[in-house]
Amino acid sequence: MSDAAIMVELDRVTKRFGSFEALKSVSLKVKLGERVIVCGPSGSGKSTLIRCINRLEPHDSGRILVEGIELTAEARKLSAVRREVGMVFQQFNLFPHMTVLKNLTLAPMRVRGTSRAEAEALAMQLLKRVRIPEQAHKYPAQLSGGQQQRVAIARALCMKPRILLFDEPTSALDPEMISEVLDVMVELAREGMTMICVTHEMGFARQVADTMVFMDHGEIVEAAPAERFFANPASERAKAFLSQILSH
Amino acid sequence: MNKRVSAVLALLAALAVLGGCSGSSYTWGWYIVSPFDARGSNNIQFLLSGVGFTITVALSAITISVVAGLLVALPGMSRIRLLRGASRIYVELFRSVPMLVMVLWVYYGVPVLLDVRLNVFAAGVIALALCDSAFEAEIFRAGIQSIDHGQHEAADALGLGYVDKMRYVILPQAIRRVLPPLGNQFVYMLKASSLLSVIGLTELTRRANELVVTEYRPLEIYTFLVVEYLVLILIASWLVRRLERRMAASDRLRVAKA
């Protein structure tokens, strides 16, 4: 896949929150179909990194290109990028006043101008894919956490994104519900979706990652092919992190 | 509703007792507003004829002020400083003007300034709506700000524009939350409509004033007026509560199996 198209490119990106430097000159390239897993201790800038890719956090300096479009404050380019980049949040962020089906059809109908019939057909197809078509007419609060997160994944997929961002998608879930969400994500990865995923699930990471990115203190300490990263991390910090996280 | 009815009856009884027990030498003349007296029932009809204006003024004013309040609240949360400032100034300005002063100012001032003709109804509605819109704006701001930031982020990430995000995601949730204070403002508008009696709108209070001038029975007539407002507002708050309960019921349905 070395000659595949570059989907996301970060070039010396920095981001501050007041005096705190969340990202210190971070550079990263993600290719079409690549599965990138971002890991690292909390507060290391992982979430900030992926939240910059659809500009939920505007970066302070450096350049971010998504499919060749540079992210600036310009609204037209931003919405063009957001149409192609799906995101799944730690807290699901489903719309509580809408049924599952409405959650899924809102954006395709309003943003892409899809007809209701078409949007609903796609939504049902995706709900089948995340294995909860029977929940289509329920409200989010009537579902379990794992089901809600699967709805959130389906909602992101409804926009037919070219890239999917996952921000700790299983961190808010009860342990017994983690695997049902990870299963769906593994399937997506197998189908060739370009994914950037922040997670602490190292078993999942081993299974799907092409590239492991290890961050600490706002920097990418190590970005390596997954096999090499798990077998023999180059940096001491990554070694220490892995030994801590894998020891139990 | 039963509790409410008995509360009204208790209050009426209290008023009657108050009248009967008063040590003063006042001789009550309830015949003036008695439905069993020819003149009294005429008077009652006259007094009640103001209720149409009281209700339409309150409904018109609250409708306008809700829309205006929303249009003031939204720029108040903008990232653009100028918009935030303009919203702030509007709220501070109209919150500070006493309603009665606003009524007089709009009725006597606006026709001169803008060279338009304003009848008392239009002037009154505009004045009440202007004053109330400042409060509506603050209510909406509180409601919108109470919505979890994740809702904004999810809408943004899906590519929804600002208008769609507000219309489909944020406002439907915010409005549900501000329904109780909105109902409160409506009740307040019903009462504030009495101020329009000073510019001659023939609503409930004006009718009472007019009758007092011809009948010289202010105590009975104003007591009747008190009861008119009481009944009107009890009905209004009962309707508001029913609406709230219906909303709450549909929310409960949503979390029933959570």
Image (cartoon, coloured by chain):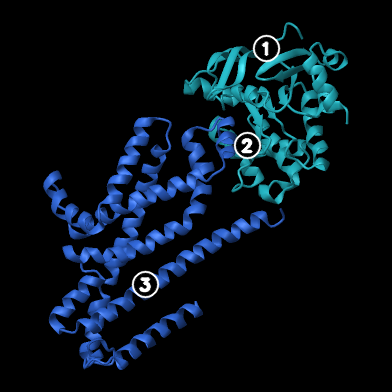
Q: Are marks 2 and 3 on the same chain?
A: no
Which of labels 2 and 3 is toward the front?
3
Q: Looking at the colours in the rendered structure, which chain would you say is drawn in blue?
A: B
Q: Is residue B220 visible?
A: yes
Secondary element type, mark 2: helix
Circle number at residue A160: none
Circle number at residue A119: 2
Q: What residue appears at the point 72 percent right and 26 percent down from the top-left corner?
A: A198
Question: What subunit carries mark 3?
Answer: B
Question: What subunit carries mark 1?
Answer: A
Relative to residue B131, is residue A76 drawn left or right? right
Secondary element type, mark 3: helix
Relative to residue B29, is residue A108 drawn left or right? right
Q: Which residue is mark 3?
A: B232
Labels in figure, total = 3
Q: Nearest the camera: A148 or A41? A: A41
Q: Are marks 2 and 1 in contact (CB under 8 Å)?
A: no
